[in-house]
Amino acid sequence: MSQSKTTAAISAVGGFVPKKILSNYDLEKMVDTTDEWIKTRTGIEERRILDIPGEGTSYLGTKAVENLLHKTNLDPKEIDLIICTTVTGDYLFPATANIISHNVGATNAFSFDIGAACSGFLYGVRTASSFLEAGTYKKVIVVGADKMSAIVDYSNRNNCIIFGDGAGAVLMEPNKEGFGVQDSVLYTDGIGKEYLLQPAGGSVKPPSVESIKNREHFIYQDGKTVFKFAVTKMAEASAEVMRKNKLTGEDINYLLAHQANKRIIDATRDRMGIDESKVLMNIQRYGNTTSGTIPLLMWDFEKKLKKGDNLILSAFGGGFTWGSIYLKWLYNS
Ligand code: UT7
């Protein structure tokens, strides 16, 4: 497969999850819930929590990028751009990507954050692809990182059961043999603000004694409505990218879906017409790590992915944001 067109391929993967495990049984002691309810309604058994005082999302992202650099022996000075996708940045500013760049010694890179909630990684990969396809840059890292425990209300059983902390990073490079990102469909609908947001802490409602008292600096989610949108939109986007590229379920090797709820992933699989064995899943161990879910799937299942495999990456999240990417895997590990 040799062609003049330049595509953007993922050439390496890194990841990091903190050591501390918060199991469903731990949550049973904190809120009125059961392991059985959580497993049946979401597929989650445990999630990881970053509990090092003074460490935020950049800690997770830095560890994931360091893991990638260690695996590839890449000199961080060769990196042109680092994109961090997150909704739990260390600060409102500066960007968490800047802190990660500094921590890993990427002194020749520029960096910025993308805030697209659970679809962040897809937005990041799509953005990186444009720079690589155009020949502007040669080595771009996309790191999806979220310390969700920083904005989760552990007295609210609707939310605290689904989220966890973690980060995954990919190196993207130009490719001349047709591997990497083939196509994408990405969407936004601002109506989502009504149903999933962190109400206080931004410029509309700066933190105040009152906002803290009202617990408005924690995630607000109307789970039922978000679920309905997610089930429909993630499946639609996956079907659309397949239709656009004349792919049937047979042509797909693996679905890497945002790990928010196993029932949403099952609905997407159903719509795509693919077998359960083609769905990569680690929701049971990490829960919903927001920007981290899809790169963490790549990290966990890297050995399973083979050169030339057709992958569909799909996500739905706050905003609302959603979409799907069709990607041809570059390497055997
Ligand atoms: O990541 C990006 C976007 N986020 C998502 O994609 C999440 C989408 N939403 C969901 O995954 C689900 O809506 C949740 C997992 C958050 C909730 O599951 P659900 O099946 O939609 O539950 P529900 O909110 O419809 O509640 C059903 C029942 C209610 O009781 P009643 O009114 O039927 O008596 C809730 O009070 O379950 C109750 N409930 C719980 N019971 C035990 C809600 N949360 C819990 C809980 N433990 N943790």
Image: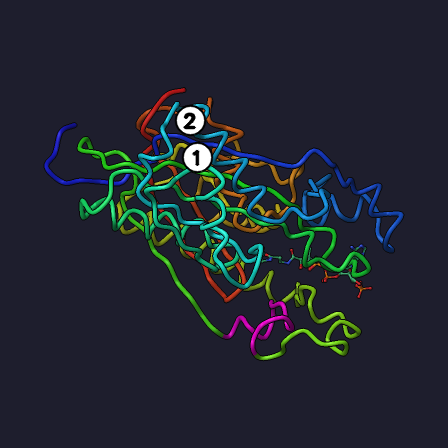
The crowding category of the residue bearing disc 2, from other C-alpha atoms within 10 Å (few below 14, some 14 to 19, many at least 20), is some
Q: Position of residue 10 (x, y in %)?
A: 35, 35
Mark 2 or 1, closer to the camera: 2
Q: Secondary structure at mark 2?
A: loop
In the rendered image, residue 195 lying in the magenta stretch gets the answer yes
Q: Position of residue 244 (x, y in %)?
A: 27, 51
Question: Relative to the observer, which residue lies in front, 48 or 56?
Answer: 56
Position above or below: 74 against 286: above
Q: Magenta stretch?
A: 191-203
Q: Secondary structure at mark 1?
A: strand
The residue positioned 87% from the left and 55% from the top of the image is: 32
Q: How is the image coloured?
A: rainbow
Q: Position of residue 170 (x, y in %)?
A: 41, 37
Q: Is residue 283 left or right of residue 35?
A: left
Question: Relative to the observer, which residue lies in front, 163 or 145?
Answer: 145
Q: Which residue is mark 2?
A: 305
Quadrant (top left, top right, bottom left, bottom right) of the C terminus: top left
Q: Which residue is mark 1?
A: 254
Q: Quadrant of ligand 1?
A: bottom right
Identified by mark 2, the residue type is: Leu
Identified by mark 1, the residue type is: Tyr
- Outermost left residue: 4
In the rendered image, residue 189 lying in the magenta stretch gets the answer no
Q: Is mark 2 within 8 Å of ligand 1?
A: no
The residue positioned 60% from the left and 68% from the top of the image is: 197
The earlier-in-sequence mark between 2 and 1 is 1
Position above or below: 62 against 97: above
Q: Is residue 222 left or right of residue 85?
A: right
The reply to whether discs 2 and 1 touch (Cβ–Cβ < 8 Å) is yes
The residue positioned 58% from the left and 79% from the top of the image is: 204
